[in-house]
Image: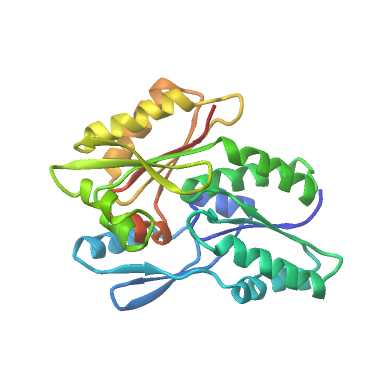
C-alpha cells in the first residue's frame, strides 16, 4: 500500500469514529464568535458546537478566515519532510479561494520537494460532501490505489455529489456574500424556510421555500428519494446546526426508505455554520 497523507480542510465534516480510525488530517481554519478568535481543527466536540450555535442565537457575530498559501505550505511541509505526498480536499472554489491557495502552496512545495506531490481537490462541496469524498479516498488508499489514481477516482465522484439544505435565516449567507440581499429578504418573514443546493459550479442557489421546519425537512427527504444511488455510494451525510430533533427525524426516514444506506450524523462545523446560522439541516449524498 502506498503511504501518503489524506487531509481535508476544517470546513468539511467527517464522523469522529472514521476520522480517528482511518488517520485523516485536518487543515485548521480560523473563525470568530463575537470578539473571540478560535481555530477549528476538525471534528469539534458537540458541547463546543452547541455553545457556538447558542452564541449565534444570542446575537454573537460569526466570521471565518480563509487559509492562505503560506498556511497550507506550513501545514504540508511536516508531511513532506517525512517523505510523504499529500492528497487534500478543499472547500468549493465557488464558495472560497481556499482551493486556489492550496494550488499555489502545491506549486511552491514542488520546487522544494521535487520527488513529492500535493494534489489539491476542488470538491465543489462543503461540510459532509467533503466528508463523503474523504471517506472514499481513505477506502481507495486501503485498497492500494496510488495517490494519483486516488486523485482521479475521487475527482470523478465530484459531479455526482448532491447537497440540499434548509436554513432558518438567509441573512447569515447574505453577510458572508454567499447570496444576494434580494434573495435574503424573501426568506426572513412568515416562517419561510429557504432550501438551497450547491450547484455544478460549487455555488449556492435557492431552489425552494417551505413554510415551517417540518415541511422543509420533508422536502430534503424527497430530494434524497429522487437522488439516492446505492450503486455509486451508500453513504449519506445529515449535518445540522444544532437542530437534533429534525436531524434525527430525517435520519429515521432515510433508514426506513433505504435500510442499506449508511447514515452519518454530525453537527455542522463552525466554519460553515458561521455562514448558515443555527438550525441549518442538510442532506448530502452521491446521487444520480
Q: Residue furthest front?
A: 182
Residue 61 x/y as whole percent: 27, 69
Identity of the residue furthest to the left in this view: 190
- Asked whether residue 141 appears in the rendered view, the answer is no
265 sits left or right of 138 in the view: left
Of the pair 271 and 249, the residue shown nearer to us: 271
Residue drawn at x 55%, y 43% is: 132
Please provide percent x and percent y for residue 97.
54, 63
Residue shown at the point (33%, 56%) measured from the top left: 173
**Numbered marks: total:** 0
On the image, the x and y values in percent for residue 104 come to 67, 68
Q: In the image, is residue 39 above or below residue 208? A: below
Question: Which image quadrant is residue 38 in?
Answer: bottom left
Residue depicted at x 41% and y 21%: 257
Image colouring:
rainbow
In this view, which residue lies farthest toward the right? 115
Q: Nearer the viewer, residue 210 or 266?
A: 210
Task: From this view, report whether residue 40 is shown above or below residue 232.
Answer: below
Q: Position of residue 117 (x, y in %)?
A: 78, 62
Question: Is residue 125 placed above or below 156 in the rendered structure?
Answer: below
Q: Is residue 111 left or right of residue 161?
A: right
Query: Which corner quadrant holds the C terminus?
Result: top right
123 left or right of 60 in image? right
Residue 90 visible in this rendered orientation of the protein: yes
Place residue 30 in its image quadrant: bottom left
Amino acid at each position: 500500500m502506498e503511504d501518503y497523507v489524506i487531509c481535508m480542510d476544517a470546513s468539511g465534516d467527517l464522523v469522529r469514529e472514521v476520522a480517528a480510525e482511518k488517520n485523516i488530517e485536518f487543515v485548521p481554519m480560523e473563525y470568530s464568535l463575537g470578539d473571540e478568535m478560535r481555530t477549528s481543527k476538525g471534528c469539534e466536540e458537540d458541547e463546543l458546537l452547541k455553545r457556538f450555535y447558542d452564541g449565534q442565537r444570542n446575537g454573537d457575530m460569526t466570521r471565518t478566515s480563509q487559509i492562505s498559501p503560506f498556511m497550507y505550505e506550513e501545514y504540508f511541509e511536516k508531511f513532506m519532510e517525512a517523505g510523504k505526498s499529500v492528497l487534500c480536499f478543499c472547500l468549493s472554489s465557488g464558495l472560497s479561494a481556499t482551493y486556489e491557495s492550496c494550488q499555489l502552496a502545491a506549486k511552491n512545495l514542488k520546487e522544494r520537494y521535487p520527488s513529492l506531490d500535493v494534489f489539491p481537490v476542488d470538491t465543489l462541496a462543503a461540510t459532509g460532501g467533503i466528508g463523503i469524498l474523504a471517506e472514499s479516498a481513505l477506502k481507495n488508499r486501503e485498497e492500494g490505489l496510488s495517490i494519483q489514481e486516488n486523485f482521479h477516482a475521487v475527482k470523478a465522484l465530484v459531479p455526482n455529489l448532491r447537497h440540499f439544505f434548509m436554513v432558518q435565516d438567509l441573512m447569515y449567507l447574505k453577510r458572508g456574500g454567499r447570496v444576494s440581499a434580494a434573495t435574503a429578504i424573501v426568506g426572513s418573514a412568515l416562517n419561510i424556510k429557504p432550501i438551497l443546493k450547491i450547484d455544478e459550479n460549487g455555488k449556492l442557489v435557492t431552489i425552494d421555500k417551505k413554510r415551517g421546519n417540518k415541511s422543509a425537512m420533508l422536502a430534503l427527504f424527497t430530494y434524497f428519494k429522487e437522488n439516492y444511488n446505492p450503486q455509486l455510494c451508500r453513504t449519506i451525510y445529515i449535518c445540522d446546526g444544532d437542530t437534533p430533533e429534525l436531524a434525527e427525524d430525517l435520519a429515521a426516514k432515510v433508514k426506513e426508505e433505504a435500510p442499506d444506506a449508511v447514515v452519518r450524523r454530525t453537527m455542522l462545523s463552525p466554519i460553515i455554520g458561521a455562514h448558515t446560522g443555527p438550525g441549518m439541516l442538510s442532506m448530502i449524498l452521491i446521487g444520480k
